[in-house]
Amino acid sequence: MIVELKPNTAKQRQDRLVEWLEELGLGVHVFEGESKTVLGLIGDTSKVDMELISSLEIVERVKKVNETFKCCNRRFHPDDTVIDVRGVKIGGGNFCVMAGPCSVESEEQIMTIARAVKKAGTHMLRGGAFKPRTSPYDFQGLKAEGIRLLIEARKETGLPIVTEIMSIADLPLFEDVDVLQVGARNMQNFDLLKVLGQTDKPILLKRGLANTLKELLMSAEYIMASGNERVILCERGIRTYSDYMRNTLDLSAVPMLHELSHLPVVVDPSHATGIARMVPPMTLAAVAAGCDGLEIEVHNDPKNALSDSAQQLTPEEFEKLSKRILVVRDAVT
Amino acid sequence: MIVELKPNTAKQRQDRLVEWLEELGLGVHVFEGESKTVLGLIGDTSKVDMELISSLEIVERVKKVNETFKCCNRRFHPDDTVIDVRGVKIGGGNFCVMAGPCSVESEEQIMTIARAVKKAGTHMLRGGAFKPRTSPYDFQGLKAEGIRLLIEARKETGLPIVTEIMSIADLPLFEDVDVLQVGARNMQNFDLLKVLGQTDKPILLKRGLANTLKELLMSAEYIMASGNERVILCERGIRTYSDYMRNTLDLSAVPMLHELSHLPVVVDPSHATGIARMVPPMTLAAVAAGCDGLEIEVHNDPKNALSDSAQQLTPEEFEKLSKRILVVRDAVT
Amino acid sequence: MIVELKPNTAKQRQDRLVEWLEELGLGVHVFEGESKTVLGLIGDTSKVDMELISSLEIVERVKKVNETFKCCNRRFHPDDTVIDVRGVKIGGGNFCVMAGPCSVESEEQIMTIARAVKKAGTHMLRGGAFKPRTSPYDFQGLKAEGIRLLIEARKETGLPIVTEIMSIADLPLFEDVDVLQVGARNMQNFDLLKVLGQTDKPILLKRGLANTLKELLMSAEYIMASGNERVILCERGIRTYSDYMRNTLDLSAVPMLHELSHLPVVVDPSHATGIARMVPPMTLAAVAAGCDGLEIEVHNDPKNALSDSAQQLTPEEFEKLSKRILVVRDAVT
Amino acid sequence: MIVELKPNTAKQRQDRLVEWLEELGLGVHVFEGESKTVLGLIGDTSKVDMELISSLEIVERVKKVNETFKCCNRRFHPDDTVIDVRGVKIGGGNFCVMAGPCSVESEEQIMTIARAVKKAGTHMLRGGAFKPRTSPYDFQGLKAEGIRLLIEARKETGLPIVTEIMSIADLPLFEDVDVLQVGARNMQNFDLLKVLGQTDKPILLKRGLANTLKELLMSAEYIMASGNERVILCERGIRTYSDYMRNTLDLSAVPMLHELSHLPVVVDPSHATGIARMVPPMTLAAVAAGCDGLEIEVHNDPKNALSDSAQQLTPEEFEKLSKRILVVRDAVT
């Protein structure tokens, strides 16, 4: 159920209404748009007297909605969400490039790459410390040490850091991380999502291997319904019968997610294609499709990378691409 | 087997070699690039004495190749194929927009739309006369009358016309059509492909519903091996478990097909999404991915269209989009 | 629109009603079940006065239906269709095994195999004369000669023959063939389906590579609406991201097609798996799922077969499997 | 790397070799088959002197293998694994039916169902206490109370219990559960798998929504490489473009997993189809395909079930099906 308030309702009166609804046992999400404030009611709304609420002076109207997603739904929150990460903004016209290696491998490696992507104008540094690998015998990441090195790299470059969390048990290690990434394989690890919903960290939520847009949004909903509304959606390619690419990048997800939700949408062309030379055209296509940001893998020595060596760009290739991103972005906005 | 000739080989000597190879029962495809001429041998090459050929004065080298596609393979034909349709070029840097209604419905309809897309700067007029429909009870197109109306529209606007052929039996009706389209459902109708390979018409070959890029190229190969090398490849969305779109537009097909083949690649964002308001962002994304052209559905009265009403743009929407296409194309080339 | 007649309506009165409906420009399909006769009206039924028809003495009731498939719909034709091919029956409790080589290769080959499958108790002989191949450079079948050899094999063994037709142009060559197969790649070659609908041959219609059950039934509808109601549906595996099998055999199609339609349903485990040693378990599973028949590839010398060598059983393997088919069929019926 | 020992090697000498290999920093898995013992070496085997080991008296031969899965690989462990759960065996010819409600809802519900499935001859009781739901607003299960009720039901019926674990944090609640289920959405929650690998509980590992067989086996490998070799694999349907079923049950997974691995394979026809009346034919098909067991949903009042009401059988339907399972199993073994 959705309660639209009249424009210019005093904050105090609004708060009193919220309190009263919460006393009825409902969850209340307050969506403050530029033009109007909307209350989204979650829980058993059958005990709510719609007529009573409608008749309140500060209420414009009450709508019984049957939307499966509430918190992330653009219908209840018409304005784009803008997420601020140490001053770097994403969403609502703010474009954000996150770049860095698939895995953090050593201090020298991450420092070299961090400097290079900073120079190329990137906004955040990405790097895997905990690596979800199909095989238990593959390199699983530097873990705590990897996070320490990312923090070092932030110290020098000032770039906020993004890295993947795989387990609730590791959460304390991420205290000083800026953006927590949930990987494709954990998109429906609902217990992890609920716990992340209790943190105050922005969450970069990647679409699962074969998940629909509705399922992606429902997973965002798990985080948001637990209290954390700072979710960034990420399209990273879906599994099909593609013969030359690792996955099929579904760029139509970008405009459709924007229509359905107010959350920022980024694209990861590196995992989607799995082939470095396919990253530039798919990056530019993603920008033209209207994404709010990109996550791109860059490595100083791709051939010897400990994971996903085939898909990482060199710093030189990334710098060239960064310039083209700006040109295409100019062309479409 | 591939025979690379030395640069500046006299045409006469080259012809003699080709003749001799053909006498051995082989098919010989001559690929004349700017820098070198390559002969692709098709058939049972086991009877060819590689050493003998290698020792010929005009031969640079002979390669035993195990490529599954030959005629459409960029390896044997490094330069982009440029196809000329009544002066309109596509491929090799020439960009071509084909626009028009899903189905030709009446003289007034096709004329109105043809004038509108011409005004918006489109290069060819598309329109369905024979319509492949899942149900035998749905509108099947105006057939011969539809082709007649397209020709009328060409007379007035000068736009070359593109329309789908579904059956070999209908071929005589397409004598005055400029580009013959093979729809997704007929991509592996090999008998149709072979017959089209014996015509001199450019063929717009659409990727099948769930076909791989290799299968698309093998179908192009059917046409080319039969003698018609003027094939345009078209990505139009593949079938997945997508929940909001009709199909999943696989834009990574664009750079990958360009890498594998020298043929022009166009994108059809209308069938891929099935939703008119998703066409503009996916069109711009396709342009940024590097396609050589677009096939876009435009209808003067989409709500009352006899087929695919949800996915057709109005002339006004198309005109606006046409301008944006130019801007993005400028940005990426 | 559906018109249910009263039980024991005189044939003459029924015919008069049908005639009158046809004069209104409607197609009328008469479904004569054991318990009742139902008329299915096809075409623009808006001009039919439902009240008038309802009031006729012989009419039980009239239903406005919005079913997408009519002729093949079990709702309008509750009894199983039984198709008789030279005395061999399929459907309605009659089980039919079709076996033979992927391709007819020589007189000796087809005769050897025909005798072997006959001995193993098979009901029909299958063999490809026209072969749809992804590559134009692969063996395309013996064509007319292949059909001639199949007819020879029938002469000796008495087994009715099943073989694939790829093009309308070849139809005269199939005059003496018993069952015409439409392959997966041609399932939506609607012009071919319409022409086959005008023949009096049973049609074995294979599900396309990535087609839904509804699309399969709509393709059956193309054949039936053109006048030929003898259609056998065939599940042969669909395209997914399977890593060890060629396709994913969708056995749930068997009970679901039986629920939706009255047509017989057969399963082809050979193409579905592409691996001979996987054919026996999947064959038994298909029988347990309730199919009406099987199409199984058998070759006297699989390793040297000209096509699909990996998936063909030897006559010995097939004979063993034939016995197990009977045991499982007994267990489930 | 694989070290095959000579037959009848003294246990003491074998242990000494294992110790020495472990001192080199390698993980050693000892596979004791009936005929021979094989050591699988995990980790960086580059430091191992193959010639030295080959020359040892007790060693038959050393093979450099590049197998991606080791512990679950039938090549290194030719005999079927048999898992014993409170006396109920599964695998190696032992067939096991697990039945019960999607969710445990109340004491009365679980007791009624437990008695009914026991009476029908089922071997274990399944029931969800922690429910992974796409939406955070859907019923999430009775949690700890659900497990308590399952234990009650075991007390009365003697049936071992199977229930799903979603989070490492909940592990203590599962101390008295017999088989821990990992759901499709958590198949690649690697941290959960590792922790379960350190328990001594049998793990029922369900194939993910769109995961390949190799990925399923690699996830089993995560559990086994952590020390727990009692893994049961479960096929439960994969995501395709199916139009009438929830998922596509991939029964070819049964014989293929048996070929690749020695682990038992069960099939869940309830989640695969999502439709109760499709469960019987798919159950029988699964049995005919050679599965080692089944997981079937049974509910005393399906229409009012709190989750997945459409797919649960009534006790009567289940009892009838149980009898048919035995008949088909007899027919195929």
Image: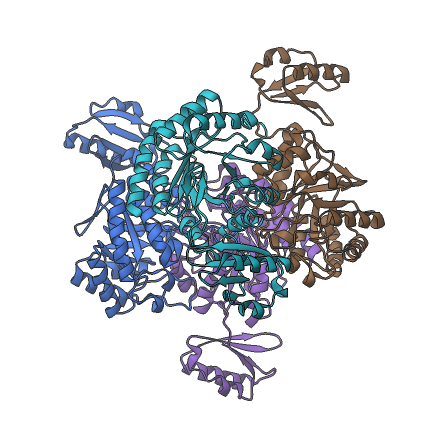
Chain colours: A cyan, B blue, C purple, D brown
**For residue B13, above or below residue D148:** above
Residue occupying the point 25% across, 65% down: B110
Judge left or right: residue B212 versus residue A320: right
Residue occupying the point 49% across, 62% down: A5
Judge left or right: residue B309 versus residue A62: left
Camera-nearest residue between C279 and A120: A120
Q: How many marks?
A: 0
Spot occupied by residue A161 in the image (x, y as percentages of width and height): 47, 33
Q: Is residue B115 visible?
A: yes
Spot occupied by residue C253 in the image (x, y as percentages of width and height): 57, 56
Camera-nearest residue between A43 and D132: A43
Spot occupied by residue C35 in the image (x, y as percentages of width and height): 62, 76
Spot occupied by residue C220 in the image (x, y as percentages of width and height): 48, 63
Judge left or right: residue D149 versus residue C148: right
Residue occupying the point 30% across, 35% down: A323
Q: Is residue B229 visible?
A: no
Camera-nearest residue between D168 and A121: A121
Quadrant for the C terminus of chain C in the image = bottom right
